[in-house]
């Protein structure tokens, strides 16, 4: 079993908070798709030796691609598309016209990830998003009316200009739409972004930790009341609607990443492509190296299991780790449990929502 990830590194504009790899030069779209097809051909044996269970178009903004471009990438997977249970497309609300949704269905894409972020126009303008709150709600309803039932949407909390009451309103408005899955992320000010530059100049002050914590715990409480499972640090799902593709990552299932900056994992090796569109395209034209590979040590693998496991509601299983590691960290385990940040029993150790707020600290403390 394997997942396939396509990184579509194009956006019509740059959001002020985003530090993912993307370009606003859309005239290179076709050249990029051709290069991705060449990469798939070079990695054909790697792809066909596994049964594909999930396909994910991420970015960037995959919804900038045409039907023909998306179709060619899917066609290159051959029978793998027919076997895939979940095919996800990330999309901006302004792209989801009725015609685009019909195209999505023609291609067999059965899951939409819609970048809402907020329903308040002043927040969207502040982050340099190009849709309105009304457009976001209309896009979700239009997708539902088109018959797409597996929909997820993103929200951002901790926006510097947002109030707690506005966050409550955002949560209420999203949940009233009755979508089966959503993700919520705390705004992180990254150095190489517009927000990072503003913070350096002293004209942006992030929300205080207490405010971010209050928003996170409020969402966790409301989601549980409405029978959403908080199954991963940033993800919530109705029963049966967990993200299968992301689950591949967390369970250590192999996946192939196609496109600039895309990562892959298989047979204890991690691989990542160059994060430069022109260089990626040129390298594929010349069939030169366009990626790097790292072979993970046993300690690397165990540390990754700690990192991804403690981001999920299942946590980590004692039997997956050396007994001496458990014994050496006994004091740490009890400290986190007594602080209300974790729970443990005879089978394993997992974080509470309060613990997820300091998960980086807990994870780094427990690393082998």
Image (cartoon, helix red, strand yellow):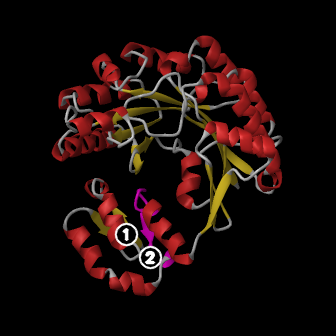
Task: Kindly identify which residue carries mark 1.
Answer: 349
Q: Is residue 366 visible?
A: yes
Label ID, residue 42: none
Residue drawn at x 33%, y 19% as measured from the top left = 125
Q: Quadrant of the C terminus?
A: bottom left
Query: Is 214 located above or below residue 272 in the figure?
Result: above
Label ID, residue 318: 2
Q: Is residue 64 visible?
A: no
State the count of labels: 2
Q: Which residues are magenta?
A: 309-320
Q: Nearer the viewer, residue 23 or 347?
A: 23
Q: Position of residue 153 (x, y in %)?
A: 45, 31
Residue drawn at x 42%, y 63% as measured from the top left = 315
Left or right relative to 161: residue 247: right
Distance in Å between CA atoms under marks 2 and 1? 8 Å
Q: Quadrant of the N terminus?
A: bottom right
Q: Is residue 86 magenta?
A: no
Left or right relative to 260: residue 178: left
Q: Position of residue 168 (x, y in %)?
A: 24, 30
Q: Provide the secondary structure element on which disc 1 rests.
A: strand
Along the polypeptide, which appears first: circle 2 or circle 1?
2
Q: Position of residue 87 (x, y in %)?
A: 65, 37
Q: Nearer the viewer, residue 305 or 297?
A: 297
Task: Identify the image quadrant of residue 154.
Answer: top left
């Amino acid at each position: 079993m394997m997942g396939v990830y396509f990184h579509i590194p194009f956006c019509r504009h740059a959001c002020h908070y985003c530090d993912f790899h993307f370009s606003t030069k859309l005239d290179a779209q076709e050249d990029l798709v051709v290069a991705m097809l060449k990469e798939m051909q070079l990695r054909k044996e790697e792809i066909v030796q596994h049964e594909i269970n999930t396909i994910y178009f991420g970015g960037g903004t995959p919804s900038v691609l045409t039907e023909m471009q998306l179709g060619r990438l899917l066609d290159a997977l051959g029978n793998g598309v027919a076997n895939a249970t979940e095919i996800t497309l990330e999309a901006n609300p302004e792209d989801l016209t009725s015609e685009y949704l019909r195209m999505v269905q023609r291609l067999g894409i059965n899951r939409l990830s819609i970048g809402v972020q907020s329903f308040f126009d002043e927040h969207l303008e502040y982050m340099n998003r190009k849709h309105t709150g009304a457009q976001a709600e209309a896009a979700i309803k239009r997708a539902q009316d088109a018959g797409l039932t597996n929909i997820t949407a993103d929200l951002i909390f901790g926006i510097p200009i947002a109030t707690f009451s506005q966050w409550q309103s955002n949560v209420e408005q999203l949940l009233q739409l009755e979508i089966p899955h959503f993700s919520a992320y705390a705004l992180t000010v990254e150095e190489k972004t517009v927000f990072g530059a503003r913070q350096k100049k002293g004209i942006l002050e992030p929300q205080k930790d207490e405010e971010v914590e209050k928003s996170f715990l409020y969402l966790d409480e409301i989601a549980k009341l409405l029978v959403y499972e908080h199954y991963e640090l940033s993800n919530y799902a109705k029963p049966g609607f967990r993200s299968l593709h992301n689950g591949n990552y967390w369970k250590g299932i192999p996946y192939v990443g196609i496109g600039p900056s895309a990562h892959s994992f298989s047979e204890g090796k991690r691989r990542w492509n160059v994060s430069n569109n022109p260089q990626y395209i040129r390298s594929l034209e010349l069939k030169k190296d366009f990626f790097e590979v790292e072979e993970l040590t046993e300690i690397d693998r165990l540390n990754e299991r700690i990192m991804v496991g403690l981001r999920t509601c299942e946590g980590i299983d004692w039997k997956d780790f050396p007994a001496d590691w458990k014994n050496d960290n006994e004091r740490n385990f009890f400290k986190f449990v007594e602080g209300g940040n974790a729970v443990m029993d005879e089978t394993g150790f997992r974080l509470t929502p309060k613990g997820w707020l300091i998960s980086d600290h807990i994870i780094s403390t427990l690393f082998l």
